[in-house]
Image: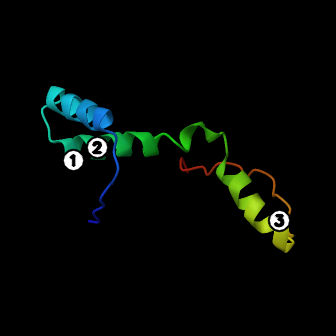
Amino acid sequence: MASMTIRNIDDHLKSRLRVQAAKHGRSMEDEARDILRAALSTQDEGSGQSLIGSIRRRILPVGGIDLDLPAREAIRNPADFGA
């Protein structure tokens, strides 16, 4: 696991973090991890971007690719296991 140091945090912000951590019964460090986890886990959900849209944006500038798709066959009759 990685670790990081956050410098120059406003005293009021640090105090609020300490109080919130105490309310949740955990350390300030654990509370900060939970806040970061929650904030970053919802960042991409509301973007409205689909996977196919992301792929298209990456491939389109390099020219894309055309695929030869085979024709679809007719639906087969179900197997008869009664005989």
Q: Residues within 10 Å of mark 3 (few under 14, many from 20)?
A: few
Mark 1 surroundings: few (<14), some (14-19) or many (≥20) residues within 10 A: few
Ranked by sequence position, the earlier of labels 2 and 3 is 2
- Residue under the point 30% across and 32% down: 12
For this view, does 36 lie left or right of residue 71?
left
Label drawn at residue 29 = 1
Closer to us: mark 2 or mark 3? 2
* 74 with respect to 38 (left or right): right
Looking at the rendered structure, the kind of residue marked 2 is: Ala
* x then y, percent, for residue 37: 36, 45
Callout 2 secondary element: helix
Nearer to us of marks 3 and 1 is 1
Q: Secondary structure at mark 1?
A: helix
- Sequence order check, earlier mark of 3 and 1: 1
Left or right, residue 10 beside residue 29:
right
Q: Distance between the Cα atoms at labels 2 and 3?
A: 40 Å
Please say whether residue 54 is visible from this viewpoint: yes
Residue 25 located left or right of residue 42: left
Residue that badge 2 annotates: 32
Residue at position x 38%, y 40% in the image: 38
Q: Is the residue under label 1 in contact with that under label 3 (CB below 8 Å)?
A: no
Q: What's the distance in space between the residues labelled 2 and 1, CA to CA?
A: 5 Å
What residue would you read off at disc 3? 60
Viewer-side residue, 56 vs 21: 21
Which residue, as the protein is rendered here, is positioned at the far top? 23
Label 2 environment density (alpha carbons within 10 Å; few <14, some 14–19, many ≥20):
some
Q: Report the quarter where the N terminus lies.
A: bottom left
- Decide: is 70 above or below 78: below
